[in-house]
Amino acid sequence: MTDRTRRLVAATALATTLVAGAAAGPAVAAPPTTSRQRQAAGIAYLKQRGNIEIDRRLGALTTLRGVVTDATHLTDADRRSLLTTIDDDTTGLTALKAKIDNDTDLATARADVKSIVTAYRVYVLLEPKVHLVRAADASSALGDAFGTLATKLQTRIDAAKQAGKDVTAAQAALDDLQAKVADATGKAAPIPGQVVPLTPAGYPGNRPTLVAARGTMLLVKADYEAARTDAKNVVNALR
């Protein structure tokens, strides 16, 4: 056999080996084929997703607890109520995570993972509830601050009037300020009582209450912005 023939034979053998190897390919895990295997794969997936979603919510609850703890103007009753809900949800989700980790039945695991959302409603209910109650209670404190400011402005108006200055514009602006503040505090005051009792079991039926409260707080904000403008107008009118 010539050298050229030998090389051709060797090359042919190598090519045959490579083709055979390519056809075989790397080892690939076969998909679950039995009912038991499919159930085990489904449970494993649900456990993974459940742990991720619970950890996200536990992080959100930690943040909300800080918001409530640090809020300056929350009433004692509202603070206690919100903290109780946050702590109960934290305990419940922690226990649920342990239960999901130990689930061995697909239907049970599926129901447990679903309850992460339906039994707690951290994002769509508790989070807006915390921010609405905090804003409503802050509105009361802001109303008190405006009341103090109004008293001082009235004193200045009275002094200017005694000095013979025309205070018509200043008095009108102050009267409007007081009306706006009264409207704002009146609108905000009922909100904690409306949203604090809302529960996950009542969602989404109770969502309109949250939406209405959010709309009310936008009106409250507009009232206070108008009151600030009135205060500036009083000062300018007295110059």
Image (cartoon, rainbow, N blue to C red):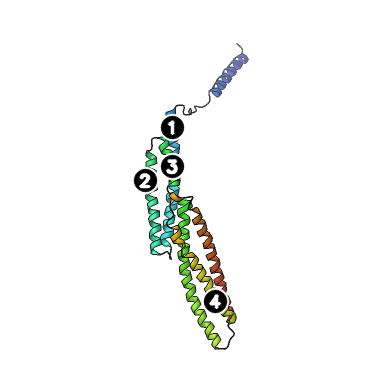
Q: 15 or 90: nearer the eye?
A: 90
CA–CA distance in space, label 2 to label 4 = 56 Å
Q: Mark 1 Cα within 10 Å, few/some/many (few <14, many 20+)?
A: some
Q: 236 or 222: nearer the eye?
A: 222
Q: Which quadrant, please, contains the C terminus?
A: bottom right
Position of 161 relative to 139 (above/below)? below
SS class of the residue under badge 1? helix
Q: Do the residues labelled 4 and 3 touch (CB within 8 Å)?
A: no
Identify the residue shown where x is 58% and y is 76%.
233
Q: Which of marks 2 and 4 is in front?
A: 4
Judge whether residue 110 can be spotted in this image: yes
The image's mark for residue 39 is: 1
The image's mark for residue 66 is: none
Residue identifier under label 3: 113
CA–CA distance in space, label 3 to label 1 = 15 Å
Query: Does label 3 or label 2 sit earlier along the sequence?
Result: 2
Query: Does label 4 or label 3 sit earlier along the sequence?
Result: 3
Q: Mark 2 Cα within 10 Å, few/some/many (few <14, many 20+)?
A: few
Query: Does label 3 or label 1 sit earlier along the sequence?
Result: 1
Identify the residue shown where x is 49% and y is 73%.
146
Which residue in the rendered view is the most extreme toward the top? 1
Residue identifier under label 2: 95
SS class of the residue under badge 4? helix
Query: Does label 1 or label 4 sit earlier along the sequence?
Result: 1
Is residue 171 shown left or right of residue 56?
A: right
Q: Do the residues labelled 3 and 2 touch (CB within 8 Å)?
A: no
Residue identifier under label 4: 175
Position of 188 relative to 86 (above/below)? below
Identify the residue shown where x is 56% and y is 80%.
171
